[in-house]
Image (cartoon, rainbow, N blue to C red):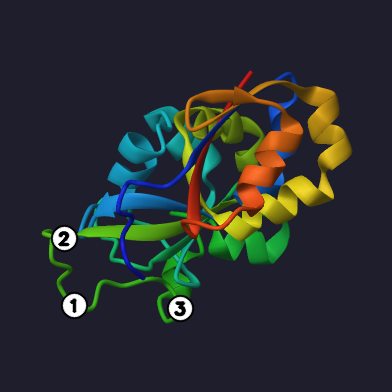
Amino acid sequence: MKPSVHNEPSFLVVTDHPSLFHPLLQRGFLVGIREGCTLRDLLEKRLGLSPDSVEEELGTIFLDGRPVDDLDATRLKDGSRLALSAAMPGLVGAALRRGGFYAAFRSDISHREEDPVPGIREAVVWVKLFNLVARTQGPRVLEKGILLERNHLREFLEDHTGDFRAHCRSVRVNGRETDPDGMLAAAGSPGSDRVRLRVLS
């Protein structure tokens, strides 16, 4: 996966219903990082989550399909895939809970650092937000801005056209004011494979 070249089309939406965009967070978005940064740095500095919300709300974290316990020792590389969730119910949830009682019993499947990760080049990681995390932290993440695959945004707008029109207060594409139909047209036009999206309320 190649890092962003910082010239993606930008979309700014002001809405009275930011949760409408939460499916995009669950499907996955991209975040630019410096390869080798810690997972805690990504959560707090890049995504803008508070230290309290990281400790209290992110009960289950998967990196490349493996549960993570130590946010400061875990380093990210280009193409890493991260899933953030509140603590899940039941025995499985207890076993996968970050830093929980059963963490020691799943050492075979927990994420472990294998090779040193260089801290030189720019990189891009995938992030997904689920359940309570999407509801409580989604507005903050969307306000900060996310990088999306262009076809994901286009498909989302096509599937939610009515709700988007009903709840959209204003739209700007590359700094120019337009309307929901103009945003849909821009999302489907040829160009960069990725777009930047900010959602304000």
Q: Residue furthest bottom?
A: 108
Residue 158 image point, x, y percent: 79, 50
- Give neighbour class at mark 3: few <14, some 14-19, many 20+ (Cα, 10 Å): few
Measure the C-alpha gap from mark 3 to mark 2.
29 Å
Give SS at disc 2.
loop
Would you say residue 67 is visible in this rendering? yes
The nearer-to-camera label among 3 and 2 is 2
Residue 89 image point, x, y percent: 71, 54
Where 76 falls versus 200 (above or below)? below
Would you say residue 131 is visible in this rendering? no
The residue pinned by badge 1 equals 115
> The disc labelled 3 sits on which kind of residue?
Ile
> The disc labelled 2 sits on which kind of residue?
Arg
Where 194 falls versus 62 (above or below)? above
Q: Quadrant of the C terminus?
A: top right
Where 151 falls versus 42 (above or below)? below
Given contact means CB atoms under 8 Å apart, are the residues at marks 3 and 2 in contact? no
Instruction: Tell me which label, 3 or 1, sits earlier in the chain.
Output: 3
- Rendered residue at 47%/43% (across/down): 9
The residue pinned by badge 2 equals 121
Tell whether 148 sits left or right of 170.
Answer: left
Observer-nearest of 74 and 94 = 74
- Give neighbour class at mark 2: few <14, some 14-19, many 20+ (Cα, 10 Å): few
Tell whether 50 sits left or right of 65.
Answer: left
